[in-house]
Amino acid sequence: MGNDDLASLLTGTDASDLTRRERALQASCDQLSLDLQRMTRLQVATTRLGGPGDLREALDEILLAAVEITGADMGYILHCDDANVLRISVQLGFVRPFLDFCVRLGTDVERISRAAMTTRHQVVTDDLLDSPMFERSPSLSAFLSAGVRAMQSTPLFDRSGALVGILSTHYRSAHRFDDAERRWLDLLARPAGDAIHRRQHLQAVRRDLAVGCIGRPRARPADNRAVGAHLGSGPIGVLHGEFGGIPG
């Protein structure tokens, strides 16, 4: 090999190595930019949730923040009400036939959220078609018809550890939930749970004042164990609520 050939080889190797480094640097910059956007949106959501507003406004903000932070296509929040029932309180991107299907099937429609509730941890499925949780489930066709191929469910707790809701986001194609995305959802879940509990308590106080029974003891919102017992005791545990909070 002559000197010219050797020089060409070294130059080509250097150029290839430089290209790899440039790509790695660009990927790192892109990730930093995405993290900054997510952090900014999380701060906005935290500020809004810490301010005034009713429960419905808080649920709308939580769901919208989750979708914007993760880039999800759809989502909904199951809210635990005073009757120990998880209801789809707000949603984004789902059509009426799917929501009506949820009402008819009750708890069976939401195996992912039920798993998140019972394990007290975030549950994800990258592809519903490959998920054992959807094997022989009548809800699989409903999700696919609604355009869902991947989803996650994150439980929301108040500071005492009581379950107050489930935050679910959905994708139209198979989706790999990386550690960063899951971590941002967990970070959002903390102020979300506090906001739901605080507004739920304020609503209860206002309702008691309205009927003149402020001194009467109130049942504490059920924790996840009580909700789990309720879901296991009857055919209906997930009911629809108000679906039009965020235009879908």
Image (cartoon, helix red, strand yellow):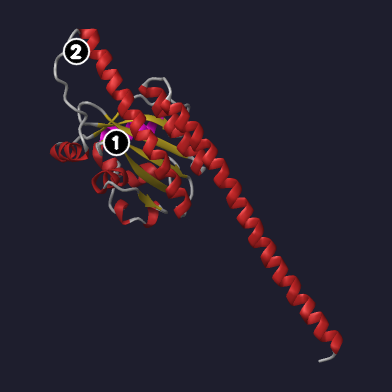
| Foreground pick, 111 / 158 | 158
Q: Is 84 a magenta residue?
A: no
The circle on residue 4 is none
Q: Which residue is mark 2?
A: 214
> Where does the magenta region start and end?
95-105
Asked if residue 92 can be seen in this view, the reply is no
Please state the horizontal and vertical placement of residue 93, each as a whole percent of the image.
46, 34
| Foreground pick, 50 / 178 | 50
Q: Is residue 136 above or below residue 93?
A: below
Q: Could you say which quadrant of the image residue 194 lies in?
A: top left
**Please, which residue is most extreme toward the right here?**
4
Given the image, on which type of amino acid does mark 1 rest? Arg
Question: In the displayed structure, does residue 201 sit left or right of residue 77?
Answer: left
Badge 1 marks a residue whose secondary structure is loop
Could you classify mark 1 by the number of other residues whose Cα lies within 10 Å: few (under 14), some (14-19), or many (20 or more)? Answer: few
* Residue at the (42%, 28%) spot, across then down: 49
Q: Is label 2 in contact with label 1 (beta carbons under 8 Å)?
A: no
Please state the horizontal and vertical placement of residue 178, each as a whole percent of the image.
46, 54
Please state the horizontal and vertical placement of residue 246, each as a whole percent of the image.
45, 27
Instruction: State which quarter of the image contains the N terminus.
Output: bottom right
Question: In the displayed structure, does residue 26 sit left or right of residue 240?
Answer: right
Asked if residue 7 can be seen in this view, the reply is yes
Q: Earlier in the sequence, mark 2 or mark 1?
A: 1
- Main secondary-structure element of the magenta-colored stretch: helix
Q: Is 98 a magenta residue?
A: yes
* Residue at the (67%, 65%) spot, across then down: 21
Badge 2 marks a residue whose secondary structure is loop
Q: Which residue is mark 1?
A: 159
Question: In the displayed structure, does residue 86 sit left or right of residue 96?
Answer: left
| Foreground pick, 17 / 113 | 17
Mark 2–mark 1 distance (CA, rounded to whole Å): 24 Å
